[in-house]
Image (cartoon, helix red, strand yellow):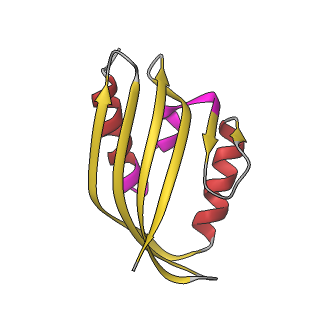
Amino acid sequence: MESIQIRVASLHQALASKNGDVWSFYADNVVRILPNFPPLIGKAASIQQSADFLESLIGAIRWSDVRSLVDERGQISMTERTLAFEHQDFGEMRQRQLCVQEWKNGRVVVERLYVMSLP
């Protein structure tokens, strides 16, 4: 099995690519905790939430300053990134995100996303 560091790098490549299979990195029973949402239980709920968010955007998400730290022994990764995008309801937005992921058997089983708005 690939190291978590390699899996995290591959996940980032999939996120940056419109054709990347992001969801293959997530367990079927993943729990995702996002700001202002109840926990999303299961891959299907996460896929639907993500699709709804992407439909609300005008244009693509612009990613920058992506940095990750991986604890192979504890099977945890932390990724800090900056996103810029235009939302149809809120206009142009910039965010700094911290994503903490717990891994098991090469898949994300828990993901917590912390978001800070930027000027």
Write the start and end of the magenta stretch as one range. Answer: 15-30
* Above or below for 13 versus 111: below
Q: Relative to the observer, which residue lies in front, 20 or 41?
A: 41
Give coordinates of residue 55: x percent, y percent.
Answer: 62, 69
Give coordinates of residue 61: x percent, y percent.
Answer: 42, 68
Q: Residue at x 64, y 28 (%)?
A: 28
* 88 relative position to 99: left or right: right
* Above or below for 112 versus 118: above
Give coordinates of residue 117: x percent, y percent.
Answer: 46, 70
Q: Residue at x 49, y 59 (%)?
A: 115
* Above or below for 119 versus 52: below
Is residue 11 on the magenta stretch?
A: no
Is residue 18 on the magenta stretch?
A: yes
Assign the C terminus to one quadrant of the image.
bottom left
Q: Quadrant of residue 88?
A: bottom right
* Above or below for 48 versus 102: below
